[in-house]
Image (cartoon, rainbow, N blue to C red):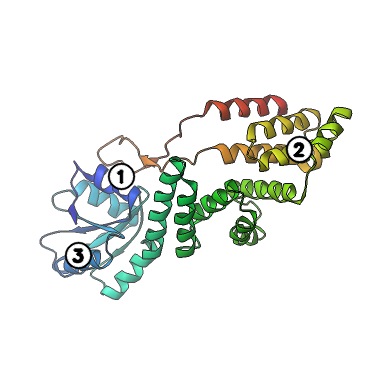
Amino acid sequence: MIDITLQNFEAELIQGSMQQPVLLDIWAPWCGPCKSLGPVLEKLEVAYAGRFKLAKLNSDEVPEIASQLSQMFGVRSIPFCVMFAGGQPVDGFVGAIPEAQIREFLDKHVPSGEMLEAQEEVAEAEGLMAEGDLESALVKLQAAVETDPANEQARFDYVRALLELDLLKEAQAAFAPVAAKAADTLTPHPRFAALGLWLQACERTAAGLDIGALQAAIATNKRDFEARYALAQGLMANQSFTEAMDELLEIIMRDKAWNGELARKTYVAILELLSKPAPKPAANEPKSALELAGRAVVPPSDPLIDQYRRKLSMALF
């Protein structure tokens, strides 16, 4: 539990809630219900074992923040509790409500133990992948997916690692829940759409591709887009991503609309696969002592990706 002041609210409340939910308890020494609610919240912080952080704000000492939050939620009494997540106030409740109701409130916003465990596994796996230890990372990612099947980052990294290790059947099984979900979605998540196209390329390559015959067909007819796309799929399956984009670019330059813009979509998918995910948003520099908004951090650019984005832009426009 921490006490919030004008000096530390940016670091402890805004930036702190980027890492884990923070429940802010707005109270005052003269408030009777506040005195009964405080110990219950402190007990729950211990019971939830790090799944959220409790912060307290004395409305008499820091009226600026208290009044801004009260106006935001249309509340005029205390105790008043506000949940912060991702650098923003997202929900709240008023009064010394029973512990059971507080637990219901917390469970709407606080990750479960399984979710936290999976997040830790993913973080460890990403570190192992960065070191090149893909096999050890795969073990962590499999555990994360089994612990929390809804963790999209874990599943994305897991399928990707399986494909990188040429474990196609396992990748197909791991991707199946995503494919089923995507069937009901008009606009699938671009990272999973990209993963699906990579999986299709691996499946087609596993079924048999005669690279020599494809190259011969292209040499005979540069507008043999079926052969060129199949060659791009073979290159994509073998993780020769830039070479695959070069072949796709040849199709795009000659016929942008070919096969429902499949070449462009696959080119964009490869760029998505090569791009590192955006870092977690960081809190904005406050315009005043009470600025509560955050901003996203722009990931550092990759010269190779920038180059191929420019190539696509030139081909399209």
Q: Position of residue 235 (x, y in %)?
A: 69, 38
Asked if residue 45 is positioned above or below residue 206 in the image, the reply reads below
Specify the amino acid type for callout 1.
Answer: Gln
User: Residue 42's mark?
Assistant: 3
Q: Where does the C terminus fall, quadrant-wise?
A: top right
| Inter-mark Cα distance, 1 to 3 | 21 Å
Could you tell which of marks 2 and 1 lies nearer the N-terminus? 1
Residue 147 as seen in the image, left or right of residue 172: left
Foreground residue among 250 and 293: 250
Q: Is there CB contact under 8 Å for labels 3 and 2?
A: no
Question: What x and y, as percent, mark residue 181?
Answer: 62, 61
Residue 299 rendering spot, x and y as whole percentages: 46, 34
The residue beneath circle 2 is 231
Numbered label attached to residue 15: 1
Q: What amino acid is labelled 2 in the image?
A: Leu
Residue at the (81%, 35%) spot, across then down: 212
Label whose residue precedes the other's in the sequence (1 or 3)? 1
- The quarter in which the N terminus is drawn is bottom left
Labelled disc at residue 69:
none
Is label 2 in contact with label 1 (beta carbons under 8 Å)?
no
Look at the picture and state if 148 lies above or below 312.
below
Q: What is the distance, in whole Å, between disc 2 and disc 1 at their CAs?
A: 47 Å
Left or right of 125? Residue 81 is left
Kindly report which numbered mark, 3 or 2, lies closer to the viewer in this rendering.
2
Say what secondary structure mark 1 lies in: helix
Q: Earlier in the sequence, mark 3 or mark 2?
A: 3
Q: Quadrant of residue 273?
A: top right
Q: Is residue 147 above or below residue 19?
A: below
Find numbered disc 2 in the image and state the secondary structure of the residue it sits on. Answer: helix
Mark 1 Cα-neighbour bin, 10 Å: few <14, some 14–19, many ≥20: many
